[in-house]
Amino acid sequence: MRRVTRSRLDVAALAAAVSSPKHGGLSTFVGVVRSVHAGRRVKGIEYDCFIPLAERELARILAQAEKKWPARVEAVHRVGSLKAGEASVAVAAGSMHRAEAFAACRWVIDEIKTRLPVWKKEKYLKGEGRWLPGCSIRHRHP
Amino acid sequence: MTRTIELYGRLRGSGLGDRVKVELPPRATARQALAALKTALGRRGNLLDGCVLATGDDVLAAADLVPDGGRLAALPPVCGG
């Protein structure tokens, strides 16, 4: 499965990939481009990405999640030009119980936001766009 | 040796486009490569604050040697999601 894609996200397919008759809990998270940010009307976001490293880092995040919880976890991140209201990232976690599914899903999206080499340039209805500030990954590699 | 460093995120607004060639000494470290990139950025060198150097496999620590082949990228602070 390609986990970094320019295509529209298929959340149902992602959920199906982690579902099992043994799983009593299935949790999904979908991140969506907001139409307003910091008081400015947003028409879309340009997602930039260093794809080879993003694919590897996302695989590492998912493997770590599956070690931390008895869960199957999948995620996909969209890149390219997205309009407000479009899904940019989706995570799905299936587990025997809801607590593990919720926890794994939450952990994965938090790790994605601080580890994946992805950058966002917001485009506004009025005025120039701007690159959003981020989280340096230097601290993980001193 | 001459190496190409790919630029991402805010670094694409540096005026250098999406990649820049730098001259590195033999057995250069990631720190030296970033220093060479900073020189290339000139007065916009502050765009490198918080940036790291990476290959397609992993992020390099400052003291890591730059691999002889493969892709090299300068990565600003990330903000996926």
Image (spheres, grey):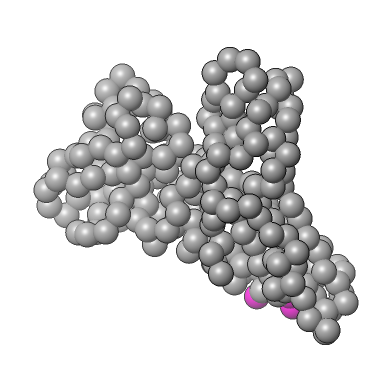
- Residue at 49% over, 56% down: A54
> For residue A100, which quarter of the picture?
bottom right
Quadrant location of the N terminus of chain A in the rendered image: bottom right
> For residue A91, which quarter of the picture?
bottom right
- Residue at 83% over, 84% down: A21
Q: Is residue B50 above or below residue B81?
A: above
Residue A51: percent from left, percent from top: 45, 54
Taking the magenta stretch, the answer to whether it contains residue B43 is no
Residue B71: percent from left, percent from top: 30, 54
B44 to the left or right of A87: left
Taking the magenta stretch, the answer to whether it contains residue A70 is yes
B69 to the left or right of B10: left
Residue at the far front: name it.
A7
Total marks shown come to 0
Q: Is residue A124 above or below residue A46?
A: above
Stretch in magenta: A67-71
> For residue A43, which quarter of the picture?
top right
- Answer yes or no: is residue A114 visible: no
- Residue at 64% over, 62% down: A75
Residue at the far top: name it.
A127
Q: Nearer the viewer, residue A82 or B53?
A: A82
- Residue at 32% over, 32% down: B17
B65 to the left or right of A46: left
- Answer yes or no: is residue A64 visible: yes
Residue A35: percent from left, percent from top: 73, 30
Residue A8: percent from left, percent from top: 63, 52
